[in-house]
Image: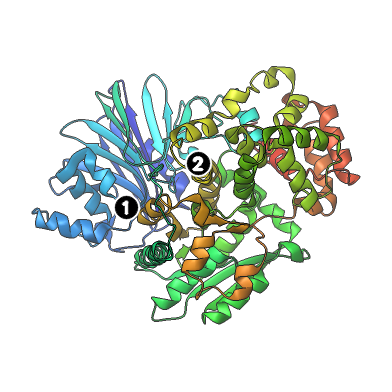
Amino acid sequence: MCGLTGALYRDGSRADPAVIRAMTNTLVHRGPDGEGVHTDGPVGLGHRRLSIIDLSQAAAQPMASQDGGTWVVFNGEIYNFLELRSTLEAHGHTFRTHGDTEVILAAWREWGEAAFAKLDGMFAIALWDKATQRLVLARDRTGKKPLYVYEDGTKLLFASEIKALLAHPGVDTRLSPEAVPQFLSHGYVPTPRTFYAHIRKVRPATVEVLEDLGRRRRFFEFWDYPLGHELELETDEQLKDAEQRIRTLFFQAVKRRLVADVPVGAFLSGGIDSTLVVAAMAQQSDRPVKTFSIGFEGHPTWDETHWARKVAERYGAEHTEFRVKPESIELIDKLAWHYDEPFGDSSAIPTYIVSKLTRETVTVALTGDGGDELFCGYPRFMGAVLAERVPKPMLRVAQRLVGLAPHGKEHQGWWERSRRFAAAAAQPLPDRLRGWVSVFGQRELGRLLKPDVAAYLNGAVLGESYQRCFERAAGADALNQVLYANARTYLLDDLNVKMDRASMAASLEARAPFLDTKLIEFASTLPGHVKLRGRTMKWILKQSMKDLIPQEIQTRPKMGFGVPLGAWFRGELSSLLDDRLLAPGSRLHQYLEKLELERLVREHREGVRDWGLQFWNLWMLEKFLSARG
């Protein structure tokens, strides 16, 4: 795991090694073990290294092909590099190192642009082919590893994090006028956009080929979820075959992610997904698995450490746990710097803390990320399917009635969750799913935003990322459409970003077996009725691994990895509402109606409605705006 940077000067100017080095050194947290810079005329490449496989200096980056004609910088892991290496050796290639970076170079020489579809892993890659004068940028299938691009009339810059782009002199840092409504709706700005007008994200599973100093370019996708080809799983034999296939693919995915020349551990929440990861690690390791979990001081309903402890005992793990207190909020300045943009998921705090704790013992940690996304682990997925079966006139009546009902006092309470379900259930499927995960609803934003900002509050723009996903998934059943849309929105721009920045802030590599390519491809062919059976979510996953999951873990309610924001903003963090959100100097007031903001604070303090999630997002936005000066 590493950090990469680079530049392509469209006017033919020579890349300055000092500038590339300054960009690269902003990413020292991503790669504390070494740095490297290479320039070749108008192109510069920079790299910070976190040594995981082949710790020798021979594996340092930027790395050149043996003839010096191709250079690469790479962030991530190629899990099938040993198989690719064997194939390439059979084609006559020789290797000086034992890692995966050199395999990328050989694969490019052997297969050209077709090489990226053969790489199985998490990666962001920048490759300079001197002979053809091509700069190639590529990002992995699910967007685990980040890659940002800045462009203006004279240069194209790229990097693992935005801060590295901003370290280049002469960068236009104007904000996108649509960013604030997008963020306050989603909790992030959807790919490919960012908060910055001239900075974008490379889309997942995408290769960008730039020729003639970037004046000619091509974009192509090398992979997508195989949708619309659901298997027929009606008989007991068909189901058992599918269950065995899931189990085999999952164990293989875990085994591939245990390959490292440094210590490996696991995050353990006590939920089904992380339990399965630890179980598979324990069965494939000759030593106790090191596990790490985190809870919340004084808030037992948000604390899963009890369940994590049970799993650790079952599998003989060396277990470490930590508890978050409200004063951990002091970490926000550090996290705001690492995330570069406002980031609405408050679980970034415990994720960072458990990453720091984990890094004291291991350098790589396996996570349960992706299990809910593949096999239907969120109640909103079940709600989306159930709403499809209810006659629309009944849903519209429920929508009108719920508009007259009071809000619940807890955002995650059963009444407020039911209210949100009814409020959006009658909408088309893309808008319904987006409505359930929105921070602020469109009507709420219409009241909160100043008129010039609300002008960008366009339903088509806010729902663009969801609509595009449902169009691409049109041939799949309803649940698989929902899962795909979630994978290309929430997983891509929230969960993956949260884990990447929080873990890399601690110089820890996080690997997600559930996001294995072969497992994703098979899970995508499973019909919705075996993922959601009755009210049982992740049914076929539980069936395939039932001997590995303690009974009490199987049956306990899903908690999620949240933060008790409502309680914190009524208690220990209440003063922040006055000191940061309502204060006369708050930068929020250039975007928001102060009287409306005061109403939200009053309702929260009086217990009329839980606005904790929204206050968190507003606080993140205020910190970002204040840091810009």
Q: Quadrant of residue 428?
A: top right
Q: Position of residue 359 (x, y in %)?
A: 51, 65
Q: Position of residue 540 (x, y in %)?
A: 49, 61
Q: Using residue 52 as the reference point, say whether residue 579 is left or right of it.
A: right
Q: Position of residue 182 (x, y in %)?
A: 61, 31
Label 2 residue SS: helix
Name which residue lies at 58% across and 30% down.
463
To which residue does mark 1 refer?
Answer: 120
Q: Is residue 135 above or below residue 522?
A: above
Q: Quadrant of residue 40?
A: top left
Labels 2 and 1: the sequence-earlier one: 1
Towards the viewer: 452 or 331: 452
Q: Can residue 247 be spotted in the picture?
A: yes
Towards the viewer: 467 or 562: 467
To which residue does mark 2 refer?
Answer: 481
Mark 2 vs mark 1, foreground winner is 2
Other-residue count near label 2 (Cα within 10 Å), few / some / many at <14 / 14–19 / ≥20: many
Q: Is residue 146 above or below residue 559?
A: above
In the rendered picture of this protein, how many numbered marks are placed on residues? 2
| Amino acid type of the residue tagged 2 in the rendering | Gln
Q: Is residue 277 above or below residue 616?
A: below
Label 1 residue SS: loop
User: Where the N terminus falls, by quadrant?
Assistant: bottom left
